[in-house]
Image: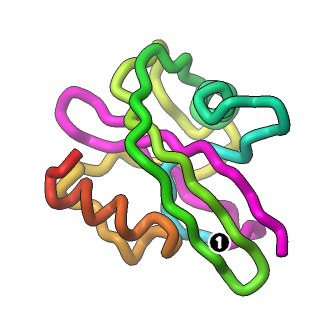
Amino acid sequence: MKHLQVAVGIIRNGDKDIFLAQRPASSHMANMWEFPGGKIEPGESAEEALKRELLEETGIEVTQATAIGSADHTYEDLRVTLNFFLVEGWEGEPWGREGQPQRWVAQGALVAEEFPPANHALVARLIAGEL
């Protein structure tokens, strides 16, 4: 079974709104909402991957990111380990550089069911104000 290591950025502004992107219709877990990020390449640290992926996907230069844990999830055809970072410092304004729909959502208004299952525990922690 394929195992992906993924760096994930929870981009949160001073109002505690969180930037979300929608997964493409052609992708695994199509049309669900997600925190931007992507695959960690060989020889790359999780933080390096986070900075590269967020620049590619959202156009921001990360200046402050804090590791806040990980989640391991096995789907029918894929095992994924998500490495989560709380991103509260960046340059630029995030937007969907790859044409994906995006939106800002108040942290307490997140809905776990709108995310892939591997994100549910983290979304619950965000909603509860633990992060």
Q: Percent position (x, y) of residue 1? A: 83, 75
Density class for disc 1 (Cα within 10 Å; few <14, some 14-19, many ≥20) is few
Left or right of 63 in this view: 130 = left
Residue 99 vs 94, above or below: the answer is below
Left or right of 14 in this view: 47 = right
Tell me the magenta residue range: 1-29
Quadrant of the snapshot with the C terminus? top left
Q: Work out which residue is located at the far bottom of the displayed protein and give it.
A: 76
According to the image, label 1 marks what residue? 30
- Residue 15 in magenta stretch: yes
Residue 22 vs 31, above or below: the answer is above
Q: Percent position (x, y) of residue 31? A: 59, 69
Q: Percent position (x, y) of residue 4? A: 74, 58
Q: At x 28% / y 61%, what residue is drawn?
A: 110
- Residue 6 in magenta stretch: yes
Q: Percent position (x, y) of residue 109? A: 21, 60
Q: At x 42% / y 48%, what residue is drawn?
A: 69
Q: At x 45% / y 64%, what residue is drawn?
A: 119
* Residue 127: quadrant of the picture: bottom left
